[in-house]
Image: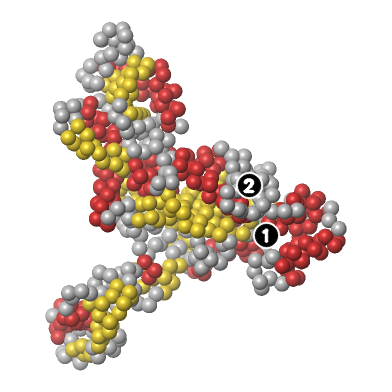
Amino acid sequence: MAKDEQNNRMEKLVSLCKRRGFIFQSSEIYGGINGFWDYGPLGAELKRNLRDTWWKAVIRQRDDVVALDASIILHPAVWKASGHVDTFSDPMSDCLLTKSRFRSDQIEPQSGTAVWFSGARSATTGHAPERPFAVLLRKNENIEQARRLAREYYAEGSVDKTTGDWMNLELLGERQEEVVNSTRFNPSNGGLLTEPRPFNLMLKTHTGPVESDDNVAYLRPETAQAIFAQFKNVVDSTRVKVPFGIAQIGKAFRNEITPRNFIFRSREFEQMELEFFIRPDEAIELLYGNVTRWEEGADLSSPQPNWGWEMWHRYWVAERTAYYAGIGLGPDVLDYYWQQPEDLAHYARATVDILFKFPFGTEELEGIAARGDFDLRQHQKHSGKPLEVFDEELKAAASALSEDQRQAFIQKTFENRSKPETTEAEISAYCHNLFKGNYLPHVIEPSAGLDRLALAILSAAYDEEVVTSDGGKSETRTVMRFHPRVAPIKCAVLPLLKNKPALVEKAREIVQSLRSQMNVFYDESGAIGRRYRRQDEAGTPFCVTVDFDTIGENGPENEGTVTLRHRDSMTQERIPITALKARLLEATL
Ligand code: GAP
């Protein structure tokens, strides 16, 4: 898609979202607040349906995943242990002139002539601030433009800007330099940016009545850490056994430097995260004498006891792909990025990003990481509480080994260690712990963003087509082709005329009969064609029209039937009211 076409599509989508009540800018009547969004009546239903499909696929339809609903504010020590306090940051650069802030790694590289100044002198005050400043001149830009910006920069705080004298500042040490693909300049005005420096993304608050360093707390930047912090409680209070997962959906907050692309990157968003705990490969080796590792074409359809982490990782990629296909996001709109060793977080063994083809480019929708035992180990260390599990089967398998076999196992584990700096003594201690049946489970983490998914679903659904109306006129129909499972309204019930009580009464009766099982919408105002168009824009997959046949005014033949209109094909069929609910449930569940 060409850039203009992409922008155009995105603009139309954003406009439809506002017009039809999917998504509004937060606090819009006060000018909005950057990076925050509200979901309107249709958006709230859409989001709820997405949450439900995830919950069903990840928790309800499985025996091995349980749920959690943790608080948003956790003990600050959690974020110290997880590494978020020290390392959860983006590189940031500020424009020296406007103070606008940019994520350094997202600045478009620019080429041109950089004009450098070493300082300026005020003719009126004699003040001569000496600080380097530069402006990048792009094609067709004049050097006077650079000088004007430089004077503006040096005037800041050194001369009275209201007098206009600042334009007389004498610029010092001007020199020019050609630069290629530089990210040191503000893309909008060419002004010099500060050197990149880390900016922690966690939003801070204070708990209790006094604001002090002692009661700093953070709004969680991800839901995952609460799962690790509650791991032991979940194990102790349920009958779960490794391999098993803990899943939760909830709000997360990040003080993003540049929130962008509508709801794609915002400061408040919702995550749907699963931490799936598995046995370490060494435990599998002890139990089964071998570990099944990933090979191209391996069967991922049903988990096997001797699967190693690679198989579980691939399995979850396949599971999540199947989930997306089930809500209408197939291989035509998805892609995958297998992170290269240099992209990987230091604790991750492998990470794959599931990407979606958004109108503004192909970007991450969900990340699936194999995180080893990093998180539990960190929380065990920082809290001082043991988080290991005891595995009866493992203990039994290990106790059947001879001393020689144990030594050989320790030796093999040492040779295969993933970190060369791990000592023989550490490996031996680790193996002896395994022989007793104890270990920290490893984790596979499929982590999806609900708002990103909503945007993916909205952009995949958006369509325009030229249709011919009954009167023979061509018009553009805007239709949201949501999968019926996630559509905000499943069915609109429309009496043909609103001033015919028998039609209205029958239509209301139908609404009542469907309401407990799906979101139904009743609409009696306007011509029927216009009502269909309104539902097309809302993405309602089915419209039921109650007409004179329904109430028997055209004879008994079609009495008790309605027309069922299909959104995508616009075809209509007559079906008995008694068959309606089953038909709709079959299509939308
Ligand atoms: N626990 C792992 C974790 O949080 P992440 O890649 O930072 O990993 C996971 O986030 C998912 O959360 C992303 O794939 C994305 O869908 C969503 N996400 C992250 N930051 C976001 C933001 N600022 N706005 C909207 N969604 C975001």
Mark 1: secondary structure: loop
Closest to the observer, 101 or 470: 470
Q: Is residue 77 above or below residue 51?
A: below
Closer to the camera in the image, 347 or 315: 315
State the CA–CA distance, disc 1 to disc 2.
Answer: 21 Å
211 on left or right of 565? right
- Relative placement, left or right, of 280 versus 490 is right
- x and y percent of residue 569 in the render? 31, 31
In-image side of 516 versus 422 (left or right): left
Disc 2 residue lies near ligand 1 with CB under 8 A: no
Q: Report which quarter residue 364 is drawn in.
A: bottom left
At 38% across and 55% down in the image, what residue appears?
Answer: 362
Q: Name which residue lies at 32% across and 11% down.
A: 559
Callout 2: helix, strand or loop?
strand
**Crowding at label 2, few (<14), some or many (≥20) Cα neighbours within 10 Å?**
some
Give the camera-side residue of 52 and 280. Answer: 280
Note whether 586 is above or below 261 in the view shown.
above
Locate residue 491, reporting x and y percent: 35, 29
Q: Amino acid at mark 1?
A: Lys
Marking on residue 385: 1
